[in-house]
Image: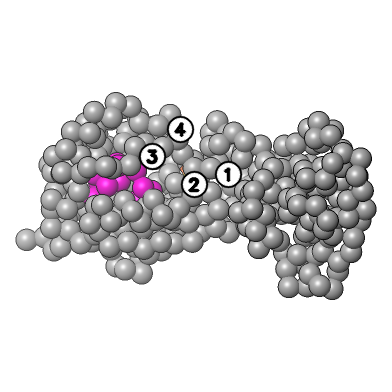
Amino acid sequence: MARKAKGIGLLSGGLDSILAVKVLQEQKIDLLGLTFKTPFFGPAEGLAAGDMAGIEMRAIDISEVHLEMLKNPRYGYGSRINPCIDCHGLMLREAAKILEAEGADFLFTGEVLGQRPMSQRRDSLRSVEKLSGLIGRILRPLSAKLLSPTIVEEEGLVDRNMLLDIQGRSRRPQRELARKYGLKDYPQPGGGCMLTNEGFASRLRKLLEIRPGATVGDVEIIKWGRAFVLPGDTICMVGRKESENSRLEALARPEDIILSGSDHPGPTCVVLAPKETFDPETAASLCASYGDAPEGAQVAVEWRAGGAERKQAAGKITAQPRPKEFFKTFLL
Ligand code: SF4
């Protein structure tokens, strides 16, 4: 009799990966689930999916390597700035390291042939396999019967007859399977991660254009508040509410500048690592304009360097609020 196989699954948080686990749980296979964290997604949804599927889970932070891949993806972007094929390839490569360390036999995903236009075409599934260096070792239990047998199927460690042949965009087979496995309140298909969001994609594109060496810290900051690009290619984030103000303040690093009005309530603004061309007057005026001071007033805007060194570099600028329309052209 064939020995018991061990499979490691990638769970993004969707129903399909939960179903892939359920299908494999019908065979005597040891299963472990992985989910990933980057500034753009996870890991909460993947962990919740693992919980629903009843599988031990691990969350892996791949923020830095993911951002580097995002700057120059081999297979390009989808409709926004989502490098889905490279992203899948990267996650599988990271999972491959764990496969090795755990002595597991195969990886599996909830991918369904033909379900998504970019990443789940037959040739994309193959490209992802190539990128990950795991040819023949990635099982897609939901579509396996439509794909070439993997090594574990050929070796008899996984029974191919118990795998499925789902394909296409219809969700009906998945709904029926969910019913079969007694899954209720399962996650509905989402539209992808933040990289598929048009507003965020244009912020990120601008950041990468201005700062090709952008770091995870830069990306975390541009997630909060309104984004402006001031003259001199300076990105300035303006908090829209108290929670964004405190988030921006907490994320600012020593190379960033924090601005806030001192005599009228107003937003916290963070200027991302300004260059020498940075004009502090414009940033102070922007900060004053989004505060409560009346037009024409003179507002004292305090500035200080972010991070632990904030006390060593600080000052005040007197600024005049302008109509918000003035800054509309700088709005990203
Ligand atoms: S939608 Fe986002 S998380 Fe999903 S594959 Fe594409 S880039 Fe990766």
64 vs 230, left or right, is left
Q: CA separation, marks 4 and 3?
A: 10 Å
Q: For the N terminus, which image quadrant?
A: bottom left
Question: What residue is drawn where x is 91% and y is 56%?
Answer: 317
Which residue was labeled with disc 4? 118
Read off the magenta span. Answer: 11-21
- Residue 180 rendering spot, x and y as whole percentages: 13, 39
Q: Which amino acid does label 1 sit on?
A: Pro
Does residue 15 belong to the magenta stretch? yes
Which residue was labeled with disc 2? 87
Ranked by sequence position, the earlier of labels 2 and 3 is: 2
Q: Residues within 10 Å of mark 2 (few under 14, many from 20)?
A: many
Q: Residues within 10 Å of mark 1 (few under 14, many from 20)?
A: some
Q: For the C terminus, which image quadrant?
A: top right
330 vs 196, left or right, is right
Q: Which amino acid does label 4 sit on?
A: Met
The secondary element bearing badge 1 is classed as loop
Q: What residue type is labelled 3?
A: Leu
Which residue was labeled with disc 3? 125
Looking at mark 4, is its residue's CB closer than 8 Å to ligand 1? Answer: yes
Q: CA separation, marks 2 and 3?
A: 12 Å
Does residue 81 belong to the magenta stretch? no
